[in-house]
Amino acid sequence: MSFQTIEQIFENNITWANKKKEEDPNYFSDLAKMQKPPYLWIGCSDSRVPPNTVTGTDPGEIFIHRNIANVVVNTDLNLLSVLEYAVVHLGVQHVIVAGHYNCGGVKAAMSNQSFGMLDSWLSNIKTVYRLHEKELDAIENLDARADRFAELNVQEQVTNLANTNIIQNAWKEGKQIQVHGWVYDLYNGLLKPISKLDNSSDVSKIYAFENL
């Protein structure tokens, strides 16, 4: 696979910008006025999964946060800030956790190798493995096990979102926010729905906030 040079990237940018202005002279001025995206995408940092490309959406439609293996951690102030801004100020209607098959972060979490500072982050994913250890260990093929692990990781991160006071407060206020879990299939380019929660879903009582 050949990659674009820095010079080519700038040339591509000029070509794209000119094409947009030809199609709609007001495209950039309208886009610059405000953003009101209906979707928040919490995805993996993997370069093979660009959110707008795989969903066929345009700039301004998806608010995006990405990290290794699309993890929702309740001590990650970066993610929580993005989530609160999206829910409270942008008024997103859908929060999507998007994992993918053949995920390097998931495979790293399956191993017993040390990856330096990354180990602390991977421990969050290893916890998901521990919760589903019996099912995953029963899958002999390691690639198939990793892909199922990616699905279970997405499922757990959707639950983690529902456990935040941000989502619970939004639901209590009557906001019709849906939390989705999807997996992107690198082998065929398709998105696969894994789970979905909304304001009618039950939150485990130990995580439920009564004083919101």
Image (tube, rainbow, N blue to C red):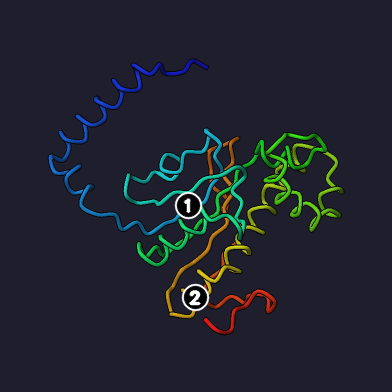
Where is residue 25, by image quadrant? top left
Q: What label does residue 169 carry, if any?
A: 2
Residue 42 percent across, percent down from the top left: 51, 51
Where is residue 74, by image quadrant? bottom right
Q: What label does residue 158 carry, if any?
A: none
The local crowd at label 1, few if under 14, some if 14 to 19, many if 20 or more residues have their Cα within 10 Å, is: many
Look at label 2 and name its amino acid.
Asn
Q: Which residue is mark 1?
A: 41
Tell me what residue is drawn at x 57 percent, y 54 percent: 76
Residue 206 visible in this rendered orientation of the protein? yes
Lower position in the chain sequence, tag 1 or tag 2: 1
Residue 151 percent across, percent down from the top left: 67, 51
Q: Is residue 41 above or below residue 117?
A: below
Q: Nearer the viewer, mark 1 or mark 2?
A: 2
Disc 2 on helix, strand or loop?
Answer: helix
Disc 1 on helix, strand or loop?
Answer: strand
Residue at the far left: name it: 25
